[in-house]
Amino acid sequence: MWWLFSRKGPSGFSASSTAEEVTHGIDGTGLTAVVTGASSGIGTETARVFALRGVHVVMAVRNIAAGREVKEAIVKEIPTAKVDAMQLDLSSMASIRKFASDFNSSGLPLNILVNNAGVMATPFTLSKDNIELQFATNHIGHFLLTHLLLETMKKTACETSKEGRIVNVSSRRHQFSYPEGIRFDKINDQSGYNGLSAYGQSKLANVLHANELHRHLKEDGVEITANSLHPGAITTNLFRHISFVSGLVDILGKYVFKNVQQGAATTCYVALHPQVKGISGKYFADSNIANASSQANDTDLAKKLWEFSLDMIK
Ligand SMILES: NC(=O)c1ccc[n+]([C@@H]2O[C@H](COP(=O)([O-])OP(=O)(O)OC[C@H]3O[C@@H](n4cnc5c(N)ncnc54)[C@H](OP(=O)(O)O)[C@@H]3O)[C@@H](O)[C@H]2O)c1
């Protein structure tokens, strides 16, 4: 297995570290987290390990029946787990507004927001709001969700004097967007659409969103951090729309891909580890700070995307 040879970075962790390993000894009791896409893959493992560390997890899931099954499995394994499942379709602004309104009126605090849900390389489709589906689900949906939950996060950080953390699960594929980065003037155009480039575009948007959010939070003097990450290449359902990759995953998965326990490590590290306290506006991979692409570090592009996204959620 490749990960037997993976090197530890400055954090003391490597590509082979699991979510349980990177959170070993961390007490998350008293923290509340929202994890999107917790019904499958990295999101399920993130929710499980958060619960194991005592965090109250609200699983924001598109398929509530699948979410309830995951919740039952977590509670069966960890009888003390505090886990809830709430319905959220990130490709629908109405659904996001309903989720945020229900969450904000529940009276629950919010310390950690993990923007994890995602779709990859879908055939060209428009969302319920007529936005290209990958940009809608992976970026705009999370942009609106974060926007609507931010006041609750600020209130929690202020009242509890505990740092809030926003974690955007991006991908190394943020480097493989369209040449111009974000196709602002053609975002919903079918002509020139390429499923993988559109995925790269949405994942580039995840990094730019975290970076710009970090600048806003810093300006406001709020004790909330915003970071993005690449979880690694992991055998999950994500590859369902790319049949040749899906086949490779089945054959070579256990040799060349991370397993989900390793795949959720960077998310859990960035969300919970004391080493990450005060670190914001950074991109992580293998539970260490890493380099994002030059487009991802372009502050003008991040500002432009911020304004563009604000306009879209009006
Ligand atoms: N796996 C990898 O190699 C890899 C590499 C780099 C980055 N990532 C990123 O990691 C994240 C998690 O992916 P994964 O590998 O765990 O894939 P996954 O197993 O397919 O999980 C994706 C999750 O997102 C949810 N989702 C999709 N569309 C949604 C929507 N409209 N509203 C709400 N939830 C929605 C899915 O719900 P359903 O079950 O209902 O479809 C599922 O729970 C993604 O952001 C992905 O881009 C993964």
Image: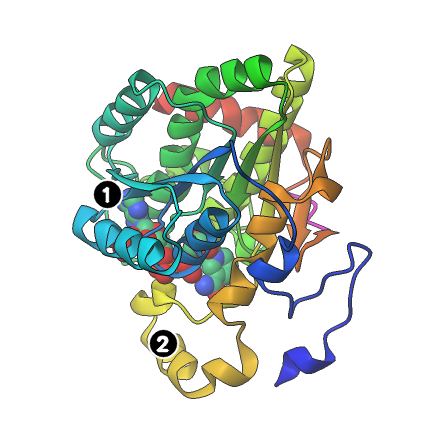
Which amino acid type is marked by label 2?
Ser
From what the image shows, is residue 68 above or below residue 302? below
Residue 59 falls in image quadrant: top left
User: 45 or 228: nearer the eye?
Assistant: 45
In space, the residues marked 2 and 1 are separated at their CA atoms by 24 Å
What secondary structure is found at the residue carrying circle 1?
Answer: loop
**The N terminus - image quarter:** bottom right
**Residue 19 location (% of width, % of height):** 57, 59
**Residue 211 location (% of width, % of height):** 63, 33
**Residue 92 location (% of width, % of height):** 24, 34
**Residue 56 location (% of width, % of height):** 43, 38
The disc, 2 or 1, on the residue closer to the chain's N-terminal end is 1
Which amino acid type is marked by label 1?
Leu
Dot label at residue 246: 2
Dot label at residue 84: none
On whether ligand 1 comes within 8 Å of the CB at mark 1, the answer is no
Residue numbers of the magenta segment: 290-295
Residue 185 falls in image quadrant: top left
Colour convention of the picture: rainbow
Of badges 2 and 1, nearer the viewer stands 2
Q: Tell me if residue 183 is in the magenta stretch.
A: no
User: What residue is drawn where x is 49% and y is 43%?
Assistant: 54
Is residue 28 in view from this perspective? yes
From what the image shows, is residue 196 above or below residue 208? below
User: What residue is drawn where x is 51% and y is 18%?
Assistant: 156
SS majority, magenta:
loop
Question: Which residue position is annotated with label 1?
Answer: 126
**The C terminus - image quarter:** top left
